[in-house]
Amino acid sequence: MITSTAWVIITAILVATSCALVGTFLVMRKMSLMGDAIAHAVLPGIVIAFLLTASRNTFPMLIGAGLFGLLTVWLTEALSKKGRIFHDASMGIVFTTLFAIGVIMISLFAANVDIDQECVLYGEIAYVPWDLWIWRDTNMGPRPVWILSLVLVINITFITLMYKELKTYSFSPQLAATLGLPVGLIHYGLMGTVSFTTIASFESVGAILVVALLIVPPATAYLLTDRFHRLLLLAVLFGITSAVGGYYLALWINSSIAGAIAVVNGLQFALVFTLAPRYGLLGKYLAGRRIQKADPVLVSYPTPK
């Protein structure tokens, strides 16, 4: 018999692993906040799915939210390529506009229903053990665990099948296009996995924690290695340790589980940022001292650029 504590930890690990895998590619592409944009912009899709089905069933809402996640990506790319707008500015325009549309739709058509922007921004992972999937009078366990497990399988399958293409595209989209790789398919495939990972996760843990798990573990791992496969593994490791450590920190201080996980994420990054042997503050300081001892003239009088 799996305890409620175990279900919560399993859910947190599934979210952290899925987010770390796709978040690594976002960090390498310098698109880290795309997950945040998607998490906000899918609100109209959730409302439309509710209005069409007259229910809060998960799968119609996932489909509606997923379509609006892809729409967010497409509109962002269209604005940045066809207009004189930088990519980050176009992202901000798209997701704030769509999120505002979703808020207005809720106030007009679903004001008396428990579906609001707080459901998107804040999740409560502690309630996962009671959100059960009953199939033919059989308790299958928490519904979010099944959904997140499916998302994780999809992410692993996509990354495994497209690993070389994704790696090349992450470092240089121009090189990928030159080599004849399907850049458009790779891009929208990656954005599709980001969309569904974000959507499937924020119901349990909230959009804010999803963004933290998309960005912070890959950024932490990036300070420790130059090998891409190690970067993926370390990102997953940091995500898992923050999920487990954050849960027990929340129990210790009697606080929000999602908030504690995000705090552990930040602490891990701060520790690595300070102590990483090559790219951390201490490593850079020691490297500078070694260079100064070896050739003090080189340090005192750098070559003009």
Image (cartoon, rainbow, N blue to C red):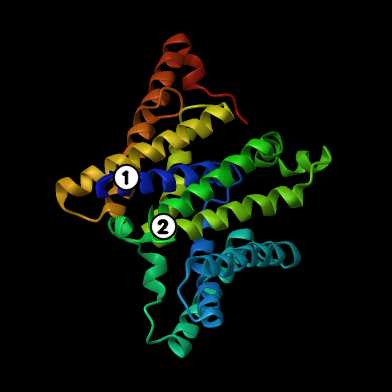
What residue appears at the point 58 percent right and 30 percent down from the top-left corner?
A: 228
> Which badge, 2 or 1, is on the more N-terminal residue?
1
Disc 2: which residue: 143
Q: Please state the horizontal and vertical placement of residue 64, each as a whole percent of the image.
A: 57, 70
> What's the residue type where badge 1 is placed?
Ile
**Horizontal side, residue 272 vs residue 230: left or right:** left
**Horizontal side, residue 237 vs residue 102: left or right:** left
Q: Which secondary structure lies at badge 1?
A: helix
| Image height of 29 relative to 179, above or below | below
The answer to whether residue 206 shows anywhere in this view is: no
Cα separation between marks 2 and 1? 14 Å
Q: Residues within 10 Å of mark 2 (few under 14, many from 20)?
A: some
Q: Please state the horizontal and vertical placement of residue 101, each as a whole percent of the image.
A: 53, 80
Disc 1: which residue: 9
What residue appears at the point 18 percent right and 48 percent down from the top-left corner?
A: 251
Q: Which quadrant holds the C terminus?
A: top right
Q: Which quadrant holds the N terminus?
A: top left
Residue 304's quadrant in the figure?
top right
62 or 99, which is in the foreground? Answer: 62
